[in-house]
Amino acid sequence: MEHTVFFTTEEKVQLKHVYRDLLHLSGSILNPKDYKLLKSDLIEAAKNNFLQRDVFGLNPILNDLETALIVASEIGMTRGAILGVMLHTCIKSGYVTTEDIEKEFGEDVAGIIRGLNRIDELYEKTPSIANENFRSLLLSFAEDMRVILIMIANRVNLMRKIKDTKNKEALQKTAEEAAYLYAPLAHKLGLYKLKSELEDLSLKYMEHDAYYLIRDKLNATKQARNEYIARFIKPIEEKLTAAGLKFHMKGRTKSIHSIWQKMKKQKCGVEGIYDLFAIRVILDSPIEKEKMECWQVYSIITDMYQPNPKRLRDWLSIPKSNGYESLHITVLGPENKWVEVQIRTERMDEIAERGLAAHWRYKGVKSGESGVDEWLNNIRNALESNDDLQLMDQFKMELYEDEVFAFTPKGDLFKFPKGASVLDFAYAIHTNVGNHCIGAKINDKNVPLRQRLNSGDQVEILTSNNQSPKQDWLNFVVTGKARTKIRQMLKETQAKQSAFAKELLERKFKNRKIDYDEPTMMHVIKKMGFKVVTDFYKSIADETTDINEVFDNYLKEQKIETGQIEHTPIPSAENYSIPSDAELKTKSNDDILVIDQNLKGLDFTLAKCCQPIYGDDVFGFITINGGIKIHRCDCPNANELRKRFGYRIVKAKWAGKRGSQYAITLKVVGNDDLGIVNNITSIISKEEKISLRSISIDSNDGLFSGNLTVMLDDTAKLENLIKKLKTIKGVKQISRN
């Protein structure tokens, strides 16, 4: 390949080696035309100074070729991905356009590059990588899954090359991104080797001393550890073979990163981690004998080595929710060292290794949605099968169609339902921000409150102290938090307006030297057509209701209540006939109540507060609408009515009845006995012309109290019923409400 002054001497040597290796790997994938066009574009871009080195001073062409080598050798992707990696820098530098690439190499390569460009734009928003939503946004932005795989390969390559950089700030940021974002994605995709390398290199750069401490300890004990594993395995192999089992065994040392995590969790040194390695026994068993043979292996091993019962993990009997099946035991091996042994079958191992039981989920790390998991596992299967890699080239991202991800100017990331507005974003930040929101800047462009968000938008909320929530805001927000907070503020605002209007009204009453009476005002509000009191006060605050009109209605109502004017025509006594004693005795079909001076036939109702019935001592009370309420003389409200409204009290007495029934509520208190309710209802059912309408019983600390509502004719039947109920064993008290 021709060289230019853009390359240093050392880079030219590296370029030859990488280019040769890439040709060897992709010789059957790329065609001669691809090589020719690719070489021409890269050389011209370098000659004309279109290419720029990154923050670490790395050569972009060499970096892309090395990434392409990882893509081809360790991931196994095809033409589109390899060319996309190597041409991405040319597009980014502005030397060529995506349209040019599409003409030269086709839509597949151009699509890969468009995805990589979108990710670059996403990173320009300086996002918070540790935010869980960022992984979802990254996947939705990439569209083509190969873009994510290329990014993982690029991060591995970058992490390998920056160990000696002087830009420590950039090194720290790159290492954090590798640990929080790319390593979990690599693990989920089945790229275990790359995942472990990313984690270990991240630890090396972020926790330098810890990394080298563990590495040196592992190196110092490697030979002894391997010898120990061989000694531990040998007798087990002999016993399992003698038992006629088909199996294979392997030992693995935990990664440096995994050991460091355990050291921090257990707060101990490397020597304190007893499971630096694990032994895996994998059985070749028919499915109907899987559990039996796994427990047979368990029995053989625990007969040889003492088990730790606290460390037994049985995922054979009840597999994990993600499908993981295995039997984990920890035994005391030679030299009194604890060793973890995992027992499973080929089928179980296949499920575990192919991602159904990914480590990052079952060790308690939160994964994405189930849809993402299933999708990533499908990609993993396509990668590992190697028989149809065209699936990868055609696989497009179809998730997150119902979700939107948006940034704050500082890079914080929020997830919303599709259709979310600027106002939803404002309330997601803080309630006060939402309450005072007047609009926003999306990607430096002013937009209104109603503007819908798109994934990747960078949103800067604009506020004003004069702004407050409006009723119509509820018409376009979609998040529950926004709706709740808007309704809450509207209620608070309405309550403040009502309090202000009420205070204003009372002050004006005082200025006019008019006594303010709350019940009278309630009648005025109702007559003015307001169903809700707050609506009335809101109209006062909004000045849509004239206060003078309120005064006029209030004074009129006051005069009606004091009898200065009549509300409705009062029937004349001439319209009524005074019954004789003989008539009272013979007219048994009429319900007669003689009111005041022997008036009868007046419109009256029985008060609900005391439930008078025929035979009770009663009196009448003239209501403000002209009707008469009949109360018992011992009514709880009687004294207050006589004290405040003595002029509206009239005499009343029962003069006859037609056999109608009245509702009476009795309060019963007694011992909490299973049969007592049955006894009460039994007595009531046997009484003639008495029926039980409802019963409610509450029990507490061995006692019960309840209310009975019965229908009966008069006080005589009521007194008789009460006497019979008092005879029931366990009934302590019966009183009329």
Image (cartoon, grey):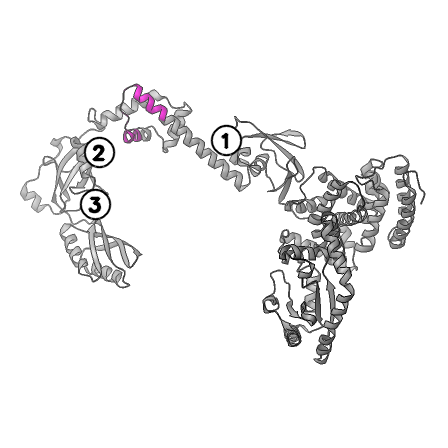
Q: Are marks 1 and 2 in contact (CB under 8 Å)?
A: no
Residue shown at the point (23%, 24%) measured from the top left: 559
* First in residue order: circle 1 vs circle 2: 1
Q: Which residue in the rendered view is the most extreme toward the top?
A: 512
Badge 1 is on which residue?
Answer: 470
Q: Which mark is residue 723?
A: none
Which residue range is magenta in the image? 503-523
Residue 697 in the image: state x and y as whole percent: 29, 55
For marks 1 and 2, give the CA distance.
Answer: 42 Å
Please name the residue shown 71% across and 78% down the image.
Answer: 239
On screen, residue 681 versus residue 619, left or right, reads: right
- Amino acid on which the number 2 mark rests in the picture: Thr
Q: Is residue 410 visible?
A: yes
**Going 85% across and 47% down the picture, which residue do you hit?**
65
Evaluate whether residue 190 shows in this view: no
Asked if the magenta segment contains residue 511, the reply would be: yes
Question: Which element is circle 1 on?
Answer: loop
Q: Is residue 89 above or below residue 709?
A: above
Given the image, on which type of amino acid does mark 1 rest? Lys
Q: Nearer the viewer, residue 331 or 214?
A: 214
- Residue pointed to by mark 2: 623
Label 1: few (<14), some (14–19) or many (≥20) C-alpha neighbours in 10 Å: few
Helix, strand or loop under label 2: loop
Residue type at mark 3: give it: Gln
Sequence-wise, the earlier of marks 3 and 1 is: 1
Q: Where's residue 360, x and y in %?
A: 66, 55
Q: Is residue 449 left or right of residue 231?
A: left
What x and y, as percent, mark residue 289? Answer: 65, 75
Report whether 547 appears left or right of 711. right
